[in-house]
Image: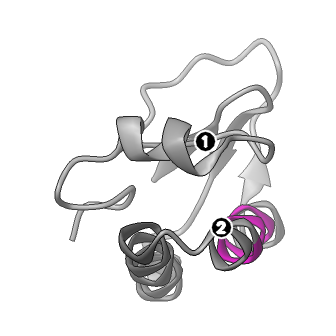
Amino acid sequence: MIVRIMGEGQVKLSDDHFTELNKLDDELLAEMEKGDGPGFRRTLTQLLEAVRRLGEPLPDDALEPSELILPASDATLEEVRDMLSDDGLIPG
């Protein structure tokens, strides 16, 4: 699967990591629903770090269709709320 982190680029991830990333996405969604700003920031950081750690960055000149688009690390809770559908960042 190809994941785009806004403002950074694309990362290729094995589908084997979907469960781990989906768990973080569920946590992020719950924190957003509660309006937990510090929790949101912590979990967004963990989600982005997991994608970077588990994935292989694509070259800057590569432009593959992204299956997932994640917010930039400095995105606000309100900006991410606007990005979300009822399914969260990672469709389940």
Query: In the rendered structure, which disc, 2 or 1, sits on the residue that comes first in sequence?
Result: 2
The residue lying toward the viewer, choosing from 77 and 1, is 77
Question: Which image quadrant is residue 88 in?
Answer: bottom left
Disc 1 target residue:
71
Amino acid type of the residue that numbered disc 2 sits on in the rendered structure: Gly
Image coordinates of residue 31 in percent, x first then y, are 49, 77
Judged left or right of residue 8, residue 72 is: left
**Residue interval drawn in magenta:** 42-49
Which residue: 68% across, 46% down?
A: 11
- Residue at the top extreme, as displayed: 61
Judged left or right of residue 19, residue 85 is: left
Residue 67 shows up from this direction: no
Judged left or right of residue 31, residue 6 is: right
Q: Secondary structure at mark 1?
A: loop
Disc 2 target residue:
37
Label 1 packing within 10 angstroms: few (<14), some (14-19), many (20+): some
Image coordinates of residue 53 in percent, x first then y, are 82, 71
Which residue: 36% across, 70% down?
A: 33
Residue 69 shows up from this direction: yes
